[in-house]
Amino acid sequence: MTPAEMQAAVIRGLKAKTGRDLEEWLALLEEAALSSRKERVTWLKSTHGVGHVTATILADHAAGDAHLQVGPQALLDQLFGKEEEAVRTQLAEVLAFARGLSQVEIVPCKGYVGLKTQRQFAALRPKNGRLEIGLALVGAPEGKVHPVRGLGGGRVTQGIWADEPWRADFEQAYRESIGLS
């Protein structure tokens, strides 16, 4: 389930789970006049007994924070829309290559684009005017890789730039993710 699908499911189930629909919660939050996201989340959890995920979704909606309210293409546009043409071209090339592999799911997130089979094997992000391809590699990489942190939920630990040879290491991470290496 993508973040947008999860958010939609939580919103659909609000009335049944909490007794209030989205509009009622937003009116309560407006009435409470809390200034920060953290205050809204804490207030929803402590005063109304709302679970953490539901509280964060409601707090984000109240603030008009669109990052959870958009679909995959909008996330891609937010992440790569202001990048140079070369970065967007490299992104399109890597995604086309990934789509040509069996069982690959492309999962745009707020700060990166995840690529997974049964588990995540790669993540893409713009960084310093370049496209960084983060890889979850167990075996020794063939190309020139560098360590990465904070990408792909911690599973991705090595990176390579899309303007350098990347296909062999990308395929190796993919094969490892489906148990072929």
Image (cartoon, rainbow, N blue to C red):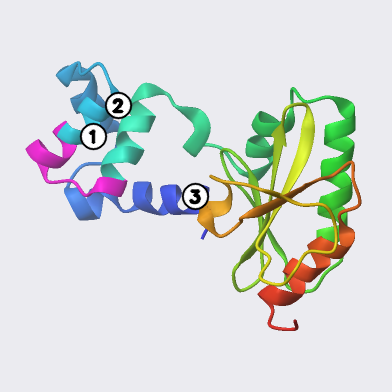
In percent of the image, x 57 and y 52: which residue is there? 152
**Closer to the camera, 95 or 144?**
144
Q: Is residue 44 magenta?
A: yes
Query: Callout 3: helix, strand or loop?
Result: helix
In percent of the image, x 56 and y 60: which residue is there? 155
- Give, as a three-letter code, the residue at label 3: Pro
> Is residue 99 in view from this perspective?
no
Residue matched to label 3: 3
The C terminus appears in which quarter of the rendering? bottom right
Task: Check residue 37 in the rendering and tell me which mark sits there, or answer none.
Answer: 2
Q: Is residue 118 above or below residue 89?
A: below
Query: Callout 1: helix, strand or loop?
Result: helix
- Give, as a three-letter code, the residue at label 1: Val
Task: Name the N-terminal-most of marks 2 and 3.
Answer: 3
Label 3 Cα neighbours within 10 Å, binned few <14 / some 14-19 / many ≥20: some
Magenta stretch in the rendered image = 43-53
